[in-house]
Amino acid sequence: MLKGNAIVGQSGGPTAAINATLAGVIKGAFDSEAIEVIYGAHNGVEGMLEGRISNLNEVLKSEMDFKLLASTPAAALGSCRRKLPKMGEDDAVYEKLFDFFKKNNIRYFFYIGGNDSMDTVAKVSAYAATHDYEIKVMGVPKTIDNDVVGTDHTPGYGSAAKYIATSMQEIIRDCAVYTVKAVTIVEIMGRDAGWLTVAAGLPRIINGVGPDYIYLPERDFDTEKFIEDVKAALEKHPNVVIAVSEGLRGADGKYVGESTQSGATDVFGHKYLSGTGKCLELLVKEKLGCKVRSIELNLLQRCASHCASKADIEESLMVGAAAVKNATAGVTGKMMCFTRTSDAPYTVEPTYADIDKIANQVREVPAEFINEAGNNVTDACLEYIKPFINGESEVFWENGLPKHFIIEYKG
Amino acid sequence: MLKGNAIVGQSGGPTAAINATLAGVIKGAFDSEAIEVIYGAHNGVEGMLEGRISNLNEVLKSEMDFKLLASTPAAALGSCRRKLPKMGEDDAVYEKLFDFFKKNNIRYFFYIGGNDSMDTVAKVSAYAATHDYEIKVMGVPKTIDNDVVGTDHTPGYGSAAKYIATSMQEIIRDCAVYTVKAVTIVEIMGRDAGWLTVAAGLPRIINGVGPDYIYLPERDFDTEKFIEDVKAALEKHPNVVIAVSEGLRGADGKYVGESTQSGATDVFGHKYLSGTGKCLELLVKEKLGCKVRSIELNLLQRCASHCASKADIEESLMVGAAAVKNATAGVTGKMMCFTRTSDAPYTVEPTYADIDKIANQVREVPAEFINEAGNNVTDACLEYIKPFINGESEVFWENGLPKHFIIEYKG
């Protein structure tokens, strides 16, 4: 068994569960005989290159610290968007990185992040293999988007889905109070895949209440058909609620935002790029003349830890610890995944996969999960994602607000 | 003691606590010897005029029903925006209303709502006094805006404040992960008073983390000073977060939205009215050129029952029940209020006040609660509102989502 120190970093956009994965990795390292000290790199690989690291053995001191960390949103170690150069292009970066590893006897490198982070894992692992320095490198994916191939779902998705479903249910209740015809359009994150928008449908199978329509980027968006849909819904009841992905595109491949706002300029004369929801709001106002508003769920989708899914947080902890177990057993250059082992009862196991089979691909919502009209999702789709929002993760409220656990770089 | 039936209705915009007040009124009626049946009017006074009512004695059957109702957002009985005519102008409406009262032996009328609802309470009470029909009419205010005079605060404000403070803390965590300079502007509801925006400051006194600036409509907004403020904050740290009221106005009395977007048109050539946050985002982009985004907290501020304040929900229940107690003791034509009886420990008592002393006034954030520079709030201000977000109201999660209690009109 390779013995030495470990380093863990976070990269890419925050989620409500990325710190749970971090807590899982740290716990795994504490429990491992192979790892003496686990360091945290501030702002991902940047922190390793600039020497901004913290000794996490001195930071996490109690079971409560782990619990608080797991319930803290965003990236407690900070993040970065740095992509490493191709090997052979600028080896100075790798040399600097490996000097850092050697100096600190780093033998395990855990990277929690998105596509760029998995790319880093693959490159660092490949560099190590050809440069006579033994280090095990493991990636743990995180993305609210759930668009990674090779895994049943991604850590972070369940909490985002729970926030979206909970908020959508509350918005529908709010919209239902008046008798005047009104359309409410809720814009949900997701540029290339509609998984987050799908979650807006969950209240339907759970509580019998849901948005009238759900439009995903997996289907070409037809504005005329959309207006017909809205009209039909307004015939049935006055309060129409619609969920749309930010990434909706027409058959011409252009984003709804681009194609419907060619004339819009801001006060400074710049082309005004408003979101998909706002554009559709203007369209409904113009075509149907009824009361209409749009709502962007925005950042809260990825950072609302106060409404995190217990299933998601527990799985994120588990996959973090499993990354350490696999690395110390000799696995390197892989990405951790979830394999669903049973639907009823729902069970998953942490597994791992080759990064090159996963990178630069997008796992879309499959065609059979979308209804024929392309304006909603099927019950089977919702049943598939339902286990991800199961249970409420513990939140440590004090004086009316959640307590968070922050890992500051102390220099 | 006047004996007979009662009716309760809800009016104006929803809150996370308006159903708790409803539950309090119903419970008060169930417990009262004076009230035989309590009816619910669907869509407020409209339901009374159109005969759309439900017998609530048959709807709320268990302690659990009351708990679920109190944790349901928006108005379970539906709402309306109807204002009654002045007495003498169109008495047909009053005649219709009183025919309905007589036919159903309605002797108690409880109206939960905003300014228009209190106006209805005053008018119905005055009409009764001159038309030989004894009925006790009581108003219970609800508004997330907290801008009602005569009361320490309003039911519904505490839950909105808790949601805003919780979300603001999460947004700040999210924004802190990168090292690149970026400005995040969070637009919070409040056209005439800044109470909701004030709540964004709560994480500062509770967890030592808060937005860099808080701008309220109580102070004239100066865009040049604002840009200077943002510049100064960016000198100190890369992640600047700012809370702004939607109702910010310049010294000329124009909303920030109006004055900075004269040139903006939408794709249909209409004047494009974007929000205050979006306008300030464009301004920062133009003047400072750094990464900037704006976030509108939007409807969730008033309907996020999953994050309701226990103090708010309990006080809302209490004030509903107290309205019934006062009415059956003979009080009529009044609005229920809270009187703060102690700061430490925080205690309030339900009281009531004359509506004519309250109507058409706005309780602003007092000058001494705003810092000298006009770009933040004082600790005293935050200490004052802190008790309102205390505790977490019970949410009845099932299969991953909150259960709600809906009162449907069955015809």
Image (spheres, coloured by chain):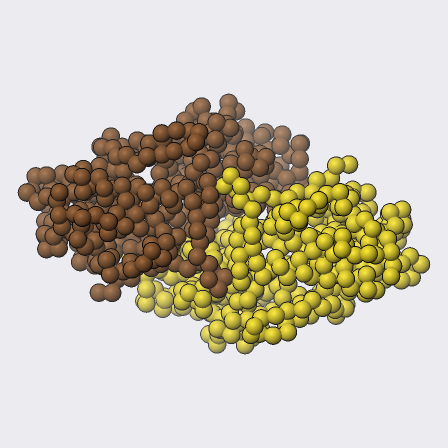
Chain colours: A brown, B yellow
Query: Depth check: B119 or B173 in front?
Result: B173
| Residue A46 makes an appearance in the image | no
| Residue B71 makes an appearance in the image | yes
Residue A267 % position (x, y): 47, 54
Please identify the quarter of the rendering in which residue A41 is found. bottom left
Rendered position, B406 above or below B204: above
Q: Residue at x 37, y 44 (%)?
A: A314
Is B4 on the left or on the right of A292, as rendered?
A: right
Please identify the quarter of the rendering in which residue B343 is found. bottom right
Query: Depth check: B146 or B180 in front?
Result: B146
Q: How many marks?
A: 0
Image quadrant for the N terminus of chain A?
A: top left
Is B299 on the left or on the right of A22, as rendered?
A: right
Is A149 on the left or on the right of A386, as rendered?
A: left
Residue found at the far right of this picture = B132
Query: Depth check: B399 or B199 in front?
Result: B399
Residue B114 % position (x, y): 69, 58
Q: Residue at x 69, y 52 (%)?
A: B23
Residue A134 % position (x, y): 10, 43
Please identify the quarter of the rendering in which residue B110 is found. bottom right
Is B86 on the left or on the right of A159, as rendered?
A: right
Q: Residue at x 70, y 53 (%)?
A: B22
Residue found at the far left of this picture = A132
Image quadrant for the C terminus of chain A?
A: bottom left
Q: Residue at x 62, y 55 (%)?
A: B17
Residue B77 % position (x, y): 70, 46
